[in-house]
Amino acid sequence: MSDTPQGHQSKRPRVTIVDVANGAGVHVSTASRALNPGTSHRISSKVVRKIEKVAEQLGYKRNSLASSLRTQKTGTIGLIVPNLSDPLFSPIIASVEERVAEDGYVTFVANSDYSPVKLRSIVERMSSQFVAGLVVASFELNDPSVELCLELGIPTVAVLRDPRHSRMSSVAMDDAAGVQAMVEHVLDLGHKDITYVTPPLAASTAQNRLAGFNAATRLAKAAGCRFDVIEARAYDVVEGERIMGHMLASGLTSTAVLAFNDLLAVGCLVALKSAGVACPEQISLAGVNDLPFMNLLSPPLTTLHTAGRDLGFESADLLMSLIKNHSQPVKRILLTPHLVLRGSTGPARKPGSSSDPSAIVIQSDPISV
């Protein structure tokens, strides 16, 4: 009679890589490499097929956790963005996830809240979890977390924001060219008094877009055009509303206002509507990023399409190449944005007309910018 209690069966010993190696008549390291998709190419296809056949016959299941502890790598990619609530990052996240999944990786997403301190903490935590690589949309210029990634040896690609480090690959939009095209658009509409709303210049996106604005205005200044730059404290709708409210209360003369992003532009539009100022009849307005539903505003927002899905895919694709070949040279990929012309921009009105912005008087308490 069997010593096994009735209704129970003895537990079958787990098949190990040693069993597979012995069954195939190869060294354990050879069996391990053959059954690892990332290293099987180093072994002849004939030997790989032999080892795979033995593994299947024995019922071997590869222990990915044990493998990750040995190699200090997991099948995970870290993706860090500055603000998860900003719809700009949704297509970037989705396309990164889709691209790395093609190579068998999953994505962990973290939010840095525009904080360099929090970004560094996230990088350290993800490193301790043995992520195979990072895609980072949170880098500022001269960001210490860039050096940290390099010191830790984590393959890293910057997306959207380029830290401009000689050893860090990046994928970004040609922000300068895009904003320059936007300024030229409103100049072509006859606007001669234009205001640009920018956030602090801590990131490459802010610096590059301001550079594009300045480049477009150099020749126009000689033709008698007037340009102002106003600095915002944040990137959101509330700040756009505050900024426009202040401009109107201060006696806005500009006939066109260009915002760093769509959220600021939406806030400006809210303030214009609250003040009874017609857009674009009295003030033309434009943003950047072409977020979802910008075409459904009243009026629909003229904006710069910055191709979030392309940014995500290209950065993830570049990261996969870095993971496979750490010695790959640094690459900087610039994607071309394009203007999406909608109803929020129109011809400039002549001074003294019923729609002249200089005739607008808004009664409110002054707000410090």
Image (cartoon, helix red, strand yellow):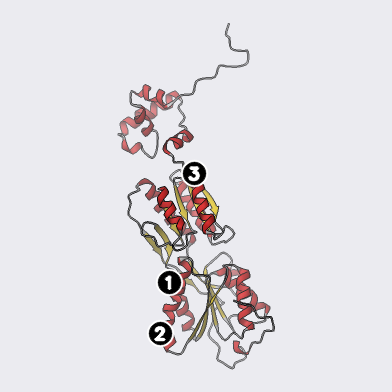
Query: How dense is the environment of label 3, judged by Cα within 10 Å: few (below 14), some, or many (20 and up)?
Result: few
Query: How dense is the environment of label 1, judged by Cα within 10 Å: few (below 14), some, or many (20 and up)?
Result: many
- For the point 33% across and 38% down, which residue is it? 41
Residue position marked by numbered label 2 in the rendering: 219
- First of labels 3, 1 by sequence position: 3
Asked whether the residues under the numbered discs 2 and 3 touch, taking CB atoms below 8 Å apart as contact, a structural biologist would say no
| 60 in relation to 8, above or below | below
Quarter assignment of residue 44: top left
Q: Secondary structure at mark 1?
A: helix
Amino acid type, mark 3: Ser
| 109 in relation to 241, above or below | above
Along the line of sight, the residue nearer the viewer: 200 or 171: 200
| 347 in relation to 6, above or below | below
| 179 in relation to 6, above or below | below
Q: Secondary structure at mark 2?
A: helix
Q: Secondary structure at mark 3?
A: helix
- For the point 39% across and 64% down, which residue is it? 334
Is residue 191 in sight in this rendering?
no
Amino acid type, mark 1: Ala
Image position, residue 101 (x, y; %): 47, 46
Asked whether the residues under the numbered discs 2 and 1 touch, taking CB atoms below 8 Å apart as contact, a structural biologist would say no
**Distance from label 2 to label 3 (Cα)?**
53 Å
The numbered dot on residue 176 is 1
The numbered dot on residue 128 is 3
Amino acid type, mark 2: Leu
- First of labels 2, 1 by sequence position: 1
Image position, residue 128 (x, y; %): 49, 44
Asked whether the residues under the numbered discs 3 and 1 touch, taking CB atoms below 8 Å apart as contact, a structural biologist would say no
Q: Nearer the viewer, mark 3 or mark 1?
A: 3
- First of labels 2, 3 by sequence position: 3
